[in-house]
Amino acid sequence: MATQRLYFIDALRAYAILMMLQGHFVSGLLDTSTINENNFLYRAWLYNRGITAPVFFTITGWVFMFLLERNPIKGWQNPRLKKGLKRAFELILWGYALRLSLPYFLTTGRITKTFLRPDVLQIIGCGLLFSMLLYLLFNSLGKLRPVLFFAIGIGIFSTNPLYTDLTFEKLPLFISAYLTKANGAVFYLLPWIGYVSFGAGIAVLMPKRPKKLPYWAIGFLTLGYVLSFHSTAIIHSLSKTLSCTLLSEVANNNFLFIHLGDVLMLFGIFMLLEPLVKQSLWQKIGTKTLSLYIVHYIILYGSFTSIGLYKFLHQSLSWEVAVLGALCFTVGVTALVLAYSKYIKPLVGRVIMLLKAK
């Protein structure tokens, strides 16, 4: 029986997590006085770094909805819902744990405001919950669901100017910080959850692994190109035709649809590359993204202990040292995680089994 696994998504995950690791290293440790914002390589690096989060959010909706769709048991009885719920809360708890500063908590008895602001793990966890909600609410709509999920994504992106500066000040910070960027979080539900909705729509549109993946790749590349390079002009045209000020504001800061196009083009590229990355080291890295994120966060930012590279080297490195350091950091963290998975984890498992047997 042919596998239904989407290997190109594992490979794209690997690309995104490695971009995130080196991006966090460089942005946190590079001396900002050495940055030339007009430098082409720097601008290209900065732009590509901005794509990683949309990639993860879109994959979240796609993969989880794909798994829900594959299961023959539908509705509330679908066993994937229970697994997804467990995974969602695991991600949310890890997101908070990595922000915890034990020295500060033990000396003051308080937690920092930073702890209350969600990061990418919490939003991905919420993305899983959102995907479950879409599945349960609209499962009976059948073939209309992709249209609905895409419409939800478009609606979230197209109304971004209306909610982006809302503070929801009457709500507690640990709730309001989830809603928009106005409360200081790097990631928040609106508008990022829109990418999850687009991913869910793709999964319903493509519920099984396509036999002719290159044709789908061409479709993704074409649509992605249109969104990345022409969506601003299209939205401007619509705003004039409809005399809609809101759409004009969207077009003037059209990063959401442009990045959606970038994500779709990356999907297309990795679909075409799948024969090269299938069952490769690259694919293995893509299955360890959570472990890679946790380990890199602890080493770089000093989770729990507040002692990390960021504390000692914050914005102090020349660009030459930062580039070399980012390469070493990314390779080192990846090697550590893969070695643990291959050698240490099985050994620990055997020791635990022996102890239980006694």
Image (tube, rainbow, N blue to C red):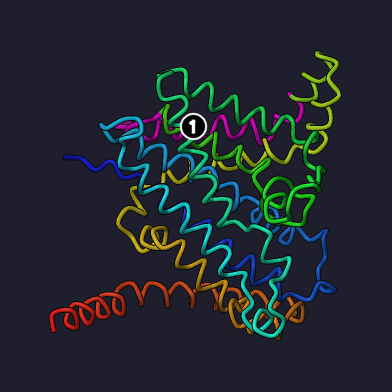
Q: Residue at x 40, y 30 (%)?
A: 215
Q: Residue at x 61, y 31 (%)?
A: 153
Name the foreground residue: 118 vs 299: 118
Q: Which residue is mark 1?
A: 134
Considering only vertical position in the picture, is 125 above or below 246? below
**Prevailing secondary structure of the magenta residues:** helix
Image position of 78 (left or right of 115): left
Q: Residue at x 68, y 51 (%)?
A: 175
Q: Quadrant of residue 308?
A: bottom right
Name the foreground residue: 195 vs 181: 181
Q: Is residue 221 magenta?
A: yes
Q: Looking at the picture, how far across and down is residue 179, in whole percent? A: 69, 45
Q: Looking at the picture, how far across and down is residue 159, in whole percent? A: 74, 31
Highlighted magenta segment, given as a residue range:
206-234
Secondary structure under tag 1 reads: helix
Q: Residue at x 41, y 25 (%)?
A: 139
Q: Quadrant of the N terminus?
A: top left
Few, some or many residues within 10 Å of mark 1 (<14, 14–19, 20+)? some
Q: Looking at the picture, how far across and down is residue 14, in whole percent? A: 46, 58
Q: Is residue 270 magenta?
A: no
Name the foreground residue: 188 vs 263: 188
Image position of 189 (left or right of 219): right
Circle 1: residue type: Leu
Considering only vertical position in the picture, is 206 above or below 19? above
